[in-house]
Image (cartoon, helix red, strand yellow):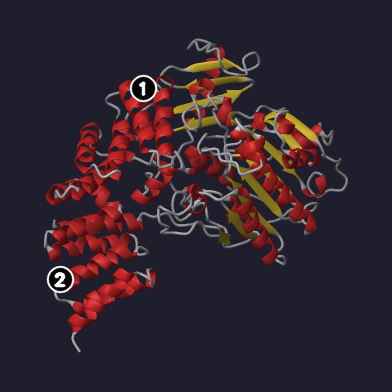
């Protein structure tokens, strides 16, 4: 099979494998009058860093006031300490193993019906306003925009010199203003479902004034206080529009933050309560339960029963009176607060609701570093963490999870392991789609402090035989610090962190990759190629390292070596338009014009929104003396980049070659 046929076949397979959004043919039956629904998710918000949850050193008046007007859940737990899986669980009511999102760039399973899809199918106008590119439905969060009439995507093709608060994230006040603008322009679009995502508490902590000064030395708290002020403005706006009393408002953290507990500075690696315990506040319409004037007020209700973020979707549909035929891992929380308020406390539904809700947690993120994934089960104030060295905690006397009492014969351990095993039986037999993020998206992840998606490090046949993350947390912290140092343009600091990490683990493919990336960005191409070549001896299937090694070899002038590196990775060429573009450029520089056409055409099939492949293909056609074909490519490039001097120059050359 020719290389063109192989590339084209792989590209077409990748295109046709894309998930198709779920469609609704009829409106689900309704059992109550609808209200507007406002879902506010606050990224990286620990429960114990909110005023109404007991933190007296922070000011969160908006969160505290919502809790006073509604129901506060003291023990709410997320299913994942990572933004994308945790939000997918909120939006689907499913655990990660069931909605399919375990990493960045992984799509929500097409069979997993989202909250927006259900509400849109019930006649709601739907809109989403995100605070970070990490949840952009066109990039790192495919499928998250399903069911939304409007999804506030980030602009594409921004230069690396663009501000962090344009390219990577948005301040809370910016997100709130965007939501306000949409709501005002859709005043007649009743009922509406609006999801607002605040990202500010995520590291690097960077609160604006006066919060930076007010919380000096506690910038994480400063970011939370600033986010609370944005929430306060949103609540004030809703009150001014007479939308507050008649709306359902839910505020929840997607996951917490380590802050040094158990050695974890941020989140994603461990499954301790520091990153799984989140605040959850629900204000029903009118401050009362559902829409029934006979029910007692729930203002200021506190529910101490264990609940999960997967319970949010069923709760909203319950409050809105929408029948949901889809399978969910969560269940409505409404019986918990009706029981707390003394309403129908003896009913069968109330008794079932107050029984223990088992909270499952998981993280595959350690596998990005070549370490074992973790799973956890939390029930009856006991917690089991499945790891190479398993952990068991009695949370009643040890809420900080400091004393591991794991014994395989312990009946409580066996019970929790059985619960985990039973849940695992429900996982679909088909493996989830692999995480796919191109080089530009991986660069965005690094700038946000996350390691880029890397299938080469997440395919271990027996994950629990990998190193225990507990033994590697210092390396993780150093790698994380190095990525943030790169984003802050402090390469020397990044190199120091990576040097320390390499001392701790000289064979770490992750550390070698990061060092190679650093050399590549600083122009030391030969050194970068050497480091990345070493990575490929450890992880031969690492497509990201293969692409970056090819980039380094290309920049060093080794065109044939770069071409060989790219051609050796079929998976890279099947799914990566930027790798195909590079291959086409290499072929063109080697004057192999006809060979250059194939990967450039394949790059356009994979991503028709980027002008560079059209520009390179136009150059190839001009070299082959095909000015008409070149002009067609130039016109496509001009449509995407109308102000490009390069496109204008090529257009002039093509016109001249075409003759009078």
Cα distance between the residues tagged 1 and 2: 53 Å
Position of 203 with respect to 638 (left or right) is right
Q: Quadrant of the N terminus?
A: bottom left
Q: Quadrant of residue 415?
A: top right
Q: Could you say which quadrant of the image residue 499 lies in?
A: top left
Say what secondary structure mark 1 lies in: loop
In-front residue for pair 393/318:
393
- Identify which residue is drawn at 82% across, 49% down: 286
Q: Where does the image place residue 200, in percent across and percent down from the top left?
A: 58, 43
Please state, as top left, top right, bottom left or bottom right, where the C terminus lies in the image.
bottom left
Question: Circle 2 — which element?
Answer: helix
Q: Residue at x 81, y 50 (%)?
A: 291
Rendered position, 587 above or below 334 = below
> x%, y% of residue 545?
27, 41
> Looking at this view, is 438 or 491 the one in front?
491
> Which residue corresponds to mark 1?
467
Q: Nearer the viewer, mark 1 or mark 2?
A: 2
Q: Farthest residue to the right: give it.
A: 294
The residue that disc 2 covers is: 623
Q: Who is closer to the viewer here, 384 or 26? A: 384
Q: Position of residue 603 (x, y in %)?
A: 28, 60
Q: Is residue 36 left or right of residue 577?
A: right
Badge number at residue 414: none
Q: How crowded is the residue under tag 2: few (<14 C-alpha within 10 Å), some, or many (20+)?
A: some
In the visual, does 597 lie left or right of 259? left
Question: What x and y, as percent, mark residue 367?
Answer: 38, 32
- For the residues bearing labels 1 and 2, Cβ distance under 8 angstroms: no
Kindly tell me whether residue 186 is visible in this rendering: no
Lower sequence index among marks 1 and 2: 1
| Residue 478 seen | yes
Q: Compared to 481, does 378 lie above or below?
A: above
């Amino acid at each position: 099979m020719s290389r063109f046929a192989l590339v084209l076949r792989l590209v077409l397979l990748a295109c046709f494998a894309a998930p198709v959004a779920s469609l609704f043919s009829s409106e689900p039956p309704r059992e109550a009058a609808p209200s507007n629904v406002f879902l506010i998710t606050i990224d990286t918000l620990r429960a114990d860093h909110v005023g109404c949850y007991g933190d007296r050193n922070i000011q969160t008046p908006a969160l505290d006031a919502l809790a006073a007007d509604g129901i506060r859940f003291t023990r709410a737990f997320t299913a994942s300490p990572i933004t994308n899986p945790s939000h997918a669980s909120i939006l689907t009511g499913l655990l990660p193993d069931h909605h399919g999102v375990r990493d960045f760039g992984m799509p929500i399973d097409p069979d997993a019906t989202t909250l927006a899809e259900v509400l849109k199918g019930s006649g709601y106008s739907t809109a989403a306003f995100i605070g970070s590119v990490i949840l952009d439905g066109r990039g790192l969060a495919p499928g998250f925009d399903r069911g939304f009439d409007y999804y506030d995507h980030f602009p594409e093709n921004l230069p690396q010199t663009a501000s962090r608060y344009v390219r990577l994230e948005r301040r809370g006040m910016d997100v709130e203003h965007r939501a306000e603008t949409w709501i005002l322009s859709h005043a007649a679009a009743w009922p509406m479902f609006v999801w607002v995502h605040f990202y500010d508490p995520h590291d690097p902590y960077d609160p604006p004034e006066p919060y930076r000064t007010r919380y000096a030395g506690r910038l994480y708290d400063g970011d939370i206080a600033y986010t609370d002020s944005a929430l306060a403005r949103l609540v004030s706006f809703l009150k001014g529009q007479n939308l507050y009393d008649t709306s359902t408002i839910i505020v929840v953290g997607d996951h917490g933050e380590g802050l040094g507990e158990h050695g974890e500075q941020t989140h994603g690696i461990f499954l301790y309560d520091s990153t799984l315990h989140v605040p959850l506040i629900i204000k029903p319409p009118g401050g009362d339960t559902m829409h029934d004037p006979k029910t007692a007020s729930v203002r200021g209700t506190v529910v101490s029963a264990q609940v999960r973020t997967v319970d949010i979707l069923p709760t909203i549909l319950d409050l809105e009176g929408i029948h949901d035929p889809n399978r969910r891992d969560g269940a409505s929380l409404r019986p918990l607060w009706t029981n707390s308020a003394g309403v129908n406390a003896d009913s069968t539904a109330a008794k079932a609701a107050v029984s223990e809700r088992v909270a499952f947690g998981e993280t595959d993120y350690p596998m990005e570093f070549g370490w074992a994934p973790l799973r956890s089960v939390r029930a009856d104030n006991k917690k089991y963490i499945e790891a190479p060295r398993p952990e068991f905690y009695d949370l009643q006397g040890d809420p900080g999870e400091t004393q591991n009492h794991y014994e395989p014969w312990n009946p409580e351990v066996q019970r929790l392991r059985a619960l985990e095993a039973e849940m695992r039986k429900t996982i679909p037999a088909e493996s989830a789609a692999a995480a796919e993020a191109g080089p530009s998206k991986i660069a965005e992840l690094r700038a946000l402090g996350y390691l880029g998606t890397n299938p080469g490090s997440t395919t271990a046949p027996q994950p629990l035989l990998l190193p225990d993350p507990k033994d590697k947390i210092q390396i993780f912290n150093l790698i994380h610090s190095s990525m943030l140092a790169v984003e802050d343009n402090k390469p020397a600091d990044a190199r120091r962190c990576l040097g320390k990490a390499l001392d701790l683990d000289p064979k770490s493919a992750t550390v070698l990759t990061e060092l190679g990336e650093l050399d590549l960005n600083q122009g030391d191409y030969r050194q970068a190629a050497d480091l990345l070549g070493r990575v490929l001896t450890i992880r031969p299937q690492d497509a990201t390292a293969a692409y970056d090694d090819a980039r380094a070899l290309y920049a060093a002038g080794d065109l044939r070596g770069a071409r060989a590196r790219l051609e050796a990775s079929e998976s890279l060429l099947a799914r990566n338009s930027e790798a195909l573009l590079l291959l086409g450029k290499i072929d063109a520089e080697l004057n192999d014009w006809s060979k250059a056409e194939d990967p450039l055409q394949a790059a356009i099939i994979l991503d028709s929104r980027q002008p560079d492949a059209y520009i390179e293909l136009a150059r190839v056609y001009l070299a082959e003396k095909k000015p008409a074909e070149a002009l067609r490519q130039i016109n496509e490039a001009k449509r995407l980049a109308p102000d490009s001097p390069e496109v204008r120059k090529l257009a002039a050359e093509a016109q001249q070659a075409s003759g009078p």
